Amino acid sequence: GQQLNQSPQSMFIQEGEDVSMNCTSSSIFNTWLWYKQDPGEGPVLLIALYKAGELTSNGRLTAQFGITRKDSFLNISASIPSDVGIYFCAGLSGGGGSQGNLIFGKGTKLSVKP
Amino acid sequence: ETGVTQTPRHLVMGMTNKKSLKCEQHLGHNAMYWYKQSAKKPLELMFVYSLEERVENNSVPSRFSPECPNSSHLFLHLHTLQPEDSALYLCASSQGRLAASHNEQFFGPGTRLTVL
């Protein structure tokens, strides 16, 4: 079945540093989504990407939809303590009226040293 | 209330108990989803309801029984669960079925379930 390989699994960074994480797959996706989950809460959508090559920003966050449609990355610039949490990528395949298939990565746990 | 709400937030039950999880969305969406989130594993889609009709059941054991009485409410009825069913159960909703562009899912806070 389809799988997403999300890396790194976890990372500790110094406040103010930039962060980069990515998701790769052997399958092609039509949409890439990046979510953040805080402890005790559900995932919250950060960025959605709909076209191969698309680069989208949301404040200090930037994400790109890979040209091959098999990967995506998320960058966080100048990290702050509230960036702590688990970041998930999700790829959506299917379309044209079908239900499609949303596959999630296992997440990247981000911890920031103050 | 706004967004997607779930009750209870925490539930501890024995293997012989029957309980229900409730989800309510206040976003006017017409599709709702149940996910299971276990440690070290990706989110697992369990059920999808679109316009109150179940459109997807990802090989979920029959001890999990969903119910969608209207487009705003979704239940997950639980009976004779196993300890390995302990997890965070997340509800989500979207406008339209998942494959269409821009139909992003909005998640509730989840119910943390522990089966003893």
Image: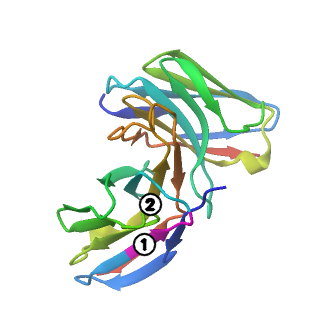
Is residue A23 on the magenta stretch? yes
Q: Which mark is residue B8?
A: none
Write the residue at 32% across / 41% down.
B102
> In this picture, which residue range is highlighted in magenta?
A21-26
Is tag 1's residue or tag 2's residue first in the polypeptide sequence? 1
Quadrant of the image occupied by residue B95: top left
Q: Residue furthest top?
A: B69
Q: Is residue A40 above or below residue B16?
A: below
Residue A37, given in percent of the width and then of the height, sits at: 41, 56
Quadrant of the image occupied by residue B40: bottom right
Write the residue at 32% across / 51% down.
A50
Q: Is residue B56 above or below residue A30?
A: above
Residue A58, given in percent of the width and then of the height, sits at: 20, 60
Q: Residue furthest left?
A: A59
Residue B92, given in percent of the width and then of the height, sits at: 46, 37
Nearer-the-camera pick, A6 or B116 = A6
Q: Spatial distance from mark 1 to mark 2, Cα to Cα? A: 8 Å
Write the residue at 45% across / 27% down.
B31
Q: Amino acid at mark 1?
A: Asn
Q: Which mark is residue A22?
A: 1
Q: Amino acid at mark 2?
A: Cys
Quadrant of the image occupied by residue B21: top right
Circles 1 and 2, Cβ within 8 Å, touching? The answer is yes
User: Which SS class for mark 2?
Assistant: strand
Mark 1 — on which chain does it sit? A
In the picture, which quadrant includes the N terminus of chain B? top left
Q: Which residue is mark 2?
A: A89
Residue B38, given in percent of the width and then of the height, sits at: 63, 55
Image-based side of A94 in relation to A84, left or right? right
Is residue B74 on the magenta stretch? no
Main secondary structure along the magenta-highlighted residues:
strand
